[in-house]
Amino acid sequence: MGSYESHTNEKPQFKGNQPVFCNWCQQWKHGHIVKTIHHEIGTTEHGTDVDTTDVKWKIHKHQKGDDPCKGSDKTFWEHNEN
């Protein structure tokens, strides 16, 4: 899933500050959802809908010690299967 992960695999409900884990500094930082793309794939043999959601996150600027973190102010995509 790239260099970051969000705190949940649930469908995002709003754009606001949410905890996002930065793998460079190994800490939870604040971020927000920039874009959500919902894909409907079809139905299973039991009639259940199959869909996925791609979420683009923006992690806010932050420090690693006295220097800017490499993951600071970056965007990344997260893929969720529903």
Image (cartoon, rainbow, N blue to C red):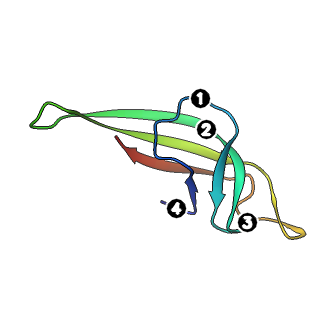
Q: In terms of sequence position, does the residue under pointer 3 or pointer 1 come before the other? A: 1
Q: Are marks 1 and 2 in contact (CB under 8 Å)?
A: yes
Label 2 vs label 3: CA separation? Answer: 19 Å
Label 2 vs label 4: CA separation? Answer: 16 Å
Measuring from the top left, give residue 20's x and y in whole percent: 64, 52
Label 1 vs label 2: CA separation? Answer: 8 Å
Q: In terms of sequence position, does the residue under pointer 4 or pointer 1 come before the other? A: 4
Measuring from the top left, give residue 28's x and y in whole percent: 69, 57
Label 3 vs label 1: CA separation? Answer: 27 Å
Q: Residue at x 49, y 49 (%)?
A: 78
Viewer-nearest of labels 3 and 1? Answer: 1
Q: The residue tagged with tag 2: helix, strand or loop? A: strand
In the picture, the disc for residue 70 is: 3
Q: Label 2, on which residue?
A: 33
Q: The residue tagged with tag 3: helix, strand or loop? A: loop
Q: Quadrant of residue 67?
A: bottom right
Amino acid type at circle 1 is Phe
Q: Label 1, on which residue?
A: 14
Amino acid type at circle 2 is Ile
Judged left or right of residue 79, residue 22 is right
Q: The residue tagged with tag 4: helix, strand or loop? A: loop
| View extreme (left): residue | 45
CA neighbours of label 3 inside 10 A, class few (<14), some (14 to 19), many (20+): some
Q: In terms of sequence position, does the residue under pointer 2 or pointer 3 come before the other? A: 2
Viewer-nearest of labels 1 and 2? Answer: 1
Q: Is residue 70 above or below residue 46?
A: below
Viewer-nearest of labels 2 and 3? Answer: 2
Measuring from the top left, give residue 29's x and y in whole percent: 72, 54
Closer to the camera, 54 or 5?
5
